Amino acid sequence: MACRDENMKRTNRVLRISQLDALELNKALEQLVWSQFTQCFHGFKPGLLARFEPEVKAFLWLFLWRFTIYSKNATVGQSVLNIQYKNDFSPNLRYQPLSKNQKLWYAICTIGGKWLEERCYDLFRNRHVASFRKAKQCMNLVVGLLKLGRLINFLIFLQRGKFATLTERLLGIHSVFCRPQNVREVGFEYMNRELLWHSFAEFLIFLLPLVSIQKLKAKLSSWCIPLTRAPSSDSTLATSGRQCSLCGEWPTMPHTIGCEHVFCYYCVKSSFLFDVSFACPKCGTEVHSLQPLKSGIEMTEVNAL
């Protein structure tokens, strides 16, 4: 039975990262609420809230505390992560909610502490009297000791995984799951397949810009339509000069690139400017020189038509 209880404790133990995430979510919520509240006074006189800013913040945090810790035993960040506070002073192994004294002291330590620090800072900022100077030094000493205590508590928390803040340790409250967490069985076949396809997609994204589409089309065309005659005779040019090898229309200002095929000047020139390694889409011959077609061949082709 004791072994079973120990296993339940281990399975229901909240991870350190989850507790820290809950704290960060609480800070983000406070910043969001404060920014939304200050936007309500955007059209008023500048600095209207500066004089009473600590009190206004304390009232907002007290409002959040009433509907989170006081009523649900969990902050907003903890509710998102399925976490809540448990009374650590209770000897019962079952879940025990926080007592009213613990909730009130939580508000005093968190909300009251922030208000006191901000108000004392504003109070001592422009005071140069000797009495205020001593009080300021005492206040700085207390704040320094609190920060040191928070640091020591955080180091202990990293080692043991309990009491993420100094307030939790002093009040005897720690984080537990609202509902027991089930151990998930992870299927690594799906994960391996996803990783494989993801790596293959990244490889294609890296490889595709290095592939010349024009050369690939030319190679495929040369394999599908093998050449039957040599590309050096003028009769071959006359036979293939009825249409542009790019646009398929009657060639305007016909030119050749060193093979038996004819192109419109604008078609071949624009293709060559777009891709320096442009090759003939029919036979795969690269552009050596752009030469106009002989006028005698043109007239023979016109008469033949």
Image (spheres, rainbow, N blue to C red):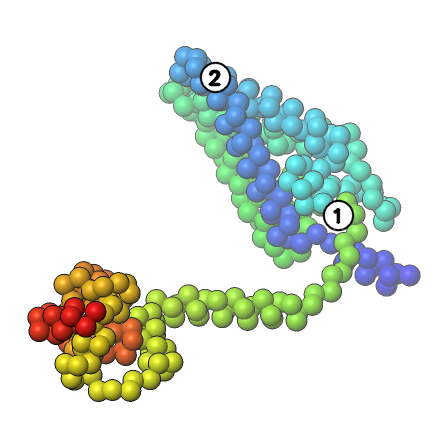
Rendered residue at 50%/27% (across/down): 35
- What is the secondary structure assignment of the residue under circle 1? strand
Residue at mark 2 to residue at mark 1: CA–CA distance: 40 Å
| In this rendering, position of residue 91 left or right of residue 84 | right
- Disc 2 marks which residue? 41
User: Which three-letter amino acid code belongs to the residue tagged 2?
Assistant: Phe
Question: In the image as oriented, which residue stretches furthest toward the top?
Answer: 45
Residue sitting at 82 percent across and 41 percent down? 96
Q: Residue furthest right?
A: 1
Quarter of the image where the C terminus is located: bottom left
Location of residue 265 in the rendering, given as x and y in whole percent from the top left corner:
16, 63
Q: Is residue 108 visible?
A: no
Q: Is residue 218 above or below residue 107?
A: below
Residue placed at 76% from the left, 60% from the top?
183
Residue 68 visible, this angle? yes
* Local secondary structure at mark 2: loop
Q: Is residue 94 left or right of residue 190?
A: right
| Mark closer to the observer (2, 1) | 2
Say what amino acid the circle numbered 1 marks.
Answer: Phe
Does residue 246 appear left or right of residue 92 in this picture?
Answer: left
Depth check, front residue: 250 or 213: 250
Q: Nearer the viewer, residue 31 or 70?
A: 31
Mark 2 neighbour density, 10 Å: few (under 14) some (14–19) many (20 or more): few
* Residue at image coords 65%, 28%: 64
Q: Quadrant of the N terminus?
A: bottom right
> Which is nearer the N-term, disc 2 or disc 1?
2
Q: Which residue is tagged 1?
A: 177
Q: Residue furthest left?
A: 295
